[in-house]
Image: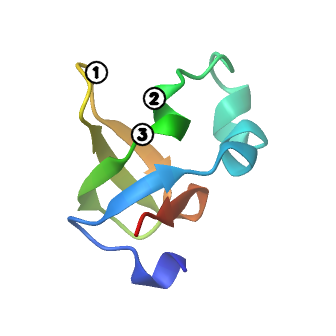
Amino acid sequence: MAGKIKKGALVRVVREKLENSLEATASDTRFPSYLFESKGEIVDMNDEYALLRFYTPTPNVWLRIDQLELVE
């Protein structure tokens, strides 16, 4: 599914993939609920990461593409 993810797509963060990741061990593991309960829009991408904008008053965040799933 990650092959279909592109700039402008609406995605949701997969809790299991984020919580068990190397990135999660490098910072606070108490993730805010909006990451998993709301949609984010991809505003930029590179080979491995996507910059997500959530429609809440929070900063954009970079996450690995394999930690995301498309929202239909």
Query: Relative to 32, does residue 62 appear above or below in the rendering?
Result: below
Circle 3 crowding by C-alpha within 10 Å: few under 14, some 14–19, many from 20: some
Circle 2 crowding by C-alpha within 10 Å: few under 14, some 14–19, many from 20: some
Q: Position of residue 65 (x, y in %)?
A: 50, 62
Instruction: Report how far apart the C-alphas of labels 2 and 3 lie in the structure.
Output: 5 Å
Q: Is residue 62 left or right of residue 17?
A: left
Instruction: Report how far apart the C-alphas of labels 1 and 3 lie in the structure.
Output: 13 Å
Quickly name the residue at label 3: 38
SS for callout 3: loop
Q: Amino acid at mark 1?
A: Thr
Q: Which mark is residue 58?
A: 1
* Corner quadrant of residue 33: top right
Which residue appears at 26% of the width and 25% of the height? 56
The quadrant of the image that shows the N terminus is: bottom right
SS for callout 1: loop
Foreground residue among 22 and 30: 30
Q: Position of residue 7 (x, y in %)?
A: 23, 68
Query: Relative to 1, does residue 19 appear above or below in the rendering?
Result: above
Which residue appears at 64% of the width and 15% of the height? 28
Q: Position of residue 67 (x, y in %)?
A: 59, 56
The quadrant of the image that shows the C terminus is: bottom left
Instruction: Report how far apart the C-alphas of labels 2 and 1 lie in the structure.
Output: 10 Å
Q: Are marks 2 and 1 in contact (CB under 8 Å)?
A: yes
